[in-house]
Image (cartoon, rainbow, N blue to C red):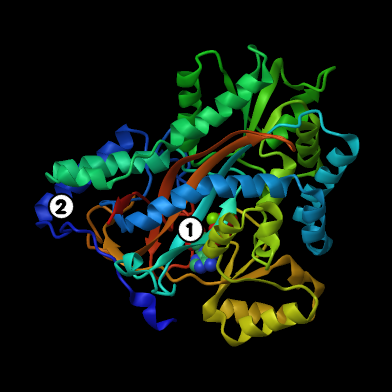
Amino acid sequence: MKEDTQATMKLPISLDLPKEELEELVDKAKDWALMNGMCLRSKKNFDRDVLQFAPFTLFPSPFPREEFHNACNIQIILNVLIHRVAHDYDFLKDTLQETVKVDDFTKNLFNIYEIIRKEGTAQKISLGMLRSDLMLDTSCPKKDTKRLKSHCCWKQVEINTIASGFGWLGPASTQLHKFVLQELGYTAELKNLPENNALQALCSGLTEAWNLYGDSQAVILFVIEDITYNICDQRFHEYEIRKQNPNIKVIRRNLTQLAATARLGSNMELMVNNYVVAVVYYRCGYEPGQYHTQKEWDARLLIERSLAIKCPSIQYHLAGTKKVQQTLAKPGMVARFLKDEKTAAKVKEVFTGLYPLDFDKYGDAAVEMGISNPQRFVLKPQREGGCNNLYGTDIKDFLESVKSKETRVAWILMDRIYPPVHRNYVVKYGNGYMNLETKELVSELGIFGVIIGDDKNIILNKQAGHMLRTKLSTDNEGGVASGLGACDSPFLI
Ligand code: ADP
Ligand code: MG
Ligand code: MG
């Protein structure tokens, strides 16, 4: 581990509460979460009719103000970058050509992309609901005196272009923490919790795309998993859509159901049962296990061929791959998409070191680097949804085993970010009052963005709120749905 791993951040309020007061506060917070829909379905004891509160931190977590605003401000530029990447066929083809040879999942996505390109597309407009995830990095140069306060700057972990979740759980966490601070009398501190309009802003992307489609009878289709655990996050989008436009109906189908029922109308409309679909919003389809057979892939292709506006369209999905992220970090690549030098430089600054494992001398060097110093890196395949990466000695073992195999090119190596540690209580279902002590934690901030446009124009581009996830500083990954992470919100310091 790096020597400065232990850099810390502190909330300017005391977390030390007498035992009884703490237990009462935890009860109140749990009930607030339950009664306001900050919940999940249980994976362990699944019952579709039962909700449990999502794991959460009792207090908001400290986050440097300047870094927070900087991350929000850059989002509209990242939106444009991804939009342009998604519309650059040559770039996507060059970038992914070696990957698709060894990674079947990416190959299947790319095949759909090629088919659509050859046929020409019925719908040129795409809807992007993106989430750029970042961590503060304790090893940044400490040249900026303003940043000295926090001893860190932030670095991008990844950018998600499909099923970017927590548009509801993010703002719900801010509301929960406002309630907790008020309970303790910290009303003056409420201004340190930045406003979070993620749900409204993301749904305005969906309703705006529906408007552009221009059929008052058409519906929005949510493409869902076979079992939705993160159900509140999805349903609150549905309710918000109705709030924004009472005429819009949402239907939910998994890929298997769509394989059986979806068809194309005479004008390439996407028909599902008797509904015409204006907008398709994928909350699924980002991992191989969600396509049980070729039929599900056929359904994805059919949707892609249709006139419906897709979130994401296939090229947006491909633009979100780790391989694209790694390629964008190469010298001159951002400049290909962002002509303004200063803008391109700003974006480059948030990238951390990313290395290909291609079958050439650079790839060989990266393999050696990973083997000799695995703690410095994270090793990533072309997958989404968490728990796919390798860390520490697993990196060394894996790289040694694939050193001379073609399959290594499906992975990328990334500098590991070591965020500053802070302390908080983590409240989880089933823990009772046990473990009610503060733990050493680290956080990952997600900034949402919405972009609508086609190959020529951008019709809408905005930053759309945020979410914060927090995990034990000793854990490698921290997905809330996977049970490792907790919902959190930033307290600007
Ligand atoms: P996914 O698309 O599956 O979410 P990520 O790239 O976000 O993949 O990785 C999953 C998790 O792994 C992140 O949420 C973060 O906790 C951890 N992680 C990923 N990259 C890094 C990194 N460079 N440094 C530290 N932790 C990382
Ligand atoms: Mg991801
Ligand atoms: Mg991620």
Q: Can residue 103 be seen in this view?
A: no
Quarter occupied by the N terminus: bottom left
Between 236 and 294, the one lying in front of the other is: 236
Q: In which quarter of the image is residue 200?
A: top left
Percent x, y for residue 372?
60, 87
Percent x, y for residue 390?
58, 70
Percent x, y for residue 382?
68, 59
Establish whether ligand 1 lies closer than 8 Å to the Cβ of label 1.
Answer: no
Describe residue 94's horizontal placement relative to residue 38 as left or right: right
Amino acid bearing label 1: Leu
Amino acid bearing label 2: Leu
Numbered circle sitting on residue 178: none
**From what the image shows, is residue 141 above or below residue 348?**
below
For marks 1 and 2 on the same chain, the one whose residue lies earlier in the sequence: 2
Label 2 crowd bin: few (<14), some (14–19), many (20+), radius 10 Å: some
Establish whether ligand 1 lies closer than 8 Å to the Cβ of label 2.
Answer: no
Q: Name the residue under label 1.
A: 134
Closer to the eye: label 1 or 2? 1
Between 111 and 71, the one lying in front of the other is: 71
Residue occupying image coordinates x 56% and y 58%: 342
Instruction: Classify mark 1: helix, strand or loop.
Output: strand
Q: Quadrant of residue 466?
A: top left
**From what the image shows, is residue 320 above or below residue 228?**
below
Residue occupying image coordinates x 77% and y 21%: 269
Residue occupying image coordinates x 33% and y 58%: 64
Q: Mark 2 points at which residue?
A: 22
**From what the image shows, is residue 56 above or below residue 253?**
below
Q: Quadrant of residue 67?
A: bottom left
Quarter occupied by the C terminus: bottom left
Describe residue 316's horizontal placement relative to residue 248 as left or right: right
